[in-house]
Amino acid sequence: MPSGAQLHILLVEDNPDHAEMILRRMKGARNRFEAEHAATLADGVEALSRRQWDAVLLDLQLPDSRGLETLDGMVQHAGDVPVVVLTSLGDEDLATAALQRGAQDYLVKEDFTTEILSRTIRYAIERKRIQERLKSSVNELANRASELEQLNRRLEVQNADLDHFNHMISHDLREPIRHLMLFSQKLRSSAGEGLPEKAGRDLQLVFAAAQRMENSISGLQTLSQASRGDIRRTRASVTFCLRAAMADLEESISERGALVSSGPMPEVDVDEALLTLLLRNLISNALKYCPTQPRIHVTAEHNGAQWVFGVRDNGIGIDPRYVDRIFEPFQRLHGREEYGGGSGLGLAIAQKIVAGHGGRITVDSKPGAGAHFRFTLSPEADGLAVFDDSSAALA
């Protein structure tokens, strides 16, 4: 609304003396107002329909309506046009009630000047516009919330369907795979020493291929669960999760003669099972990609508002050009049979677990210089900068 624009005002007032006084003061406002006068509520409502108005000045005591009913009748037809109530001395309580029923402001007829009239009308217009914008924003937010609720319901249905599908696929694929593994071993056992060498190698290839497929199916199921972000946070000891991960890898650690150590670890709010799986995958990755004796160190640092955990190894390292690829499912930088094979899902699962906690995982590495994986678990997972007393170096 330009400050110098002329405003079109509808005055609804049955008292001729009051009407003349108000119109005279509007005329004295340096041509800022163009006014029209109506003496009844019915005439005022009819005038509303004839043109666009910037504001309505409304007396509540009219021949065809009294009190707040007058305001209700006008507000019902005014739409986005602000209504300023005109009252007499001693009617402030009525005016306050009118504000609660939709009026933008009120004026005491015996106690205002041209400047007060001008300022009140302009403020009422601006407040009404702000209210309409807020109302529009609230309605838009409500619509967006409704759309999001519908999307969430559809996602819940789709996730349920996906779970059912994964279960069926897992069951239907695993059954023949297990038969392949079982009968390839039975054939080797039944044939005994009479089994030709080439046939033995072929059966071993069948068994290895079936085992890779079994591992891939298990990995895909875990990846699907981690991707859904079904996180159940509890206060957990990272030391406990680390020891559980090492227990799962005990055979590999022993076979490789690996040295796994840890600095002090905190207690944080995490999904304990998923954190254990995350640590197991990172340590397993470090064991796999080390041609010499693996040396793995797990750390926790309190960096400002959050914990930063790390798994550092002395393995073959990673070319910086490929650090983004390694977190993608089935992305391998080496041949399928190199470095013990694998499904190519370990780091993808690790990344999904971290993302599900609201954190971030990165890796610092270069070829031949090992790798240092770092991850956060979001401020929500943070504890105080206090370490778990049960933490100790691991060997």
Image (cartoon, rainbow, N blue to C red):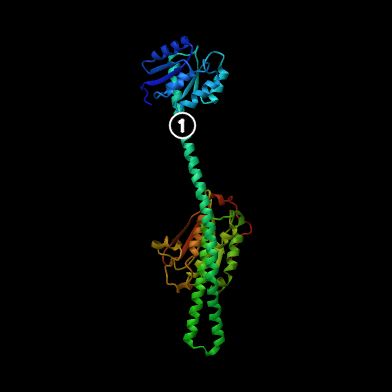
Q: Pointer 1: residues within 10 angstroms few (<14), some, or many (20+)?
A: some
Residue 170 lies, in percent from the top left, at 54, 67
Above or below, comparing residue 121 to residue 387 in the picture = above
Q: Report if residue 376 is visible in the image.
A: no
Hey, what amino acid is under mark 1? Glu
Taking the view exactly as shown, the residue that stands out farthest to the right is: 390
Taking the view exactly as shown, the residue that stands out farthest to the top is: 17
The residue nearer to you, when weighing 42 against 210, is 42
Q: Report if residue 347 is visible in the image.
A: yes
Residue 287 lies, in percent from the top left, at 51, 69
Residue at the spot 47% in from the left edge and 72% down from the top edge: 341
The residue nearer to you, when weighing 225 against 236, is 225
Residue placed under numbered mark 1 in the picture: 132
Taking the view exactly as shown, the residue that stands out farthest to the bottom is: 194
Is residue 393 toward the left or the right of residue 83 in the image? Answer: right
Quarter of the figure that contains the C terminus: bottom right
Quarter of the figure that contains the N terminus: top left
Element at badge 1? helix
* Quarter residue 258 falls in: bottom right
Above or below, comparing residue 347 to residue 133 in the picture = below
Figure disc tally:
1
Residue 30 lies, in percent from the top left, at 36, 15
Residue 29 lies, in percent from the top left, at 39, 15
Residue at the spot 41% in from the left edge and 17% down from the top edge: 36
Above or below, comparing residue 290 to residue 190 in the picture = above
The residue nearer to you, when weighing 96 against 348, is 96
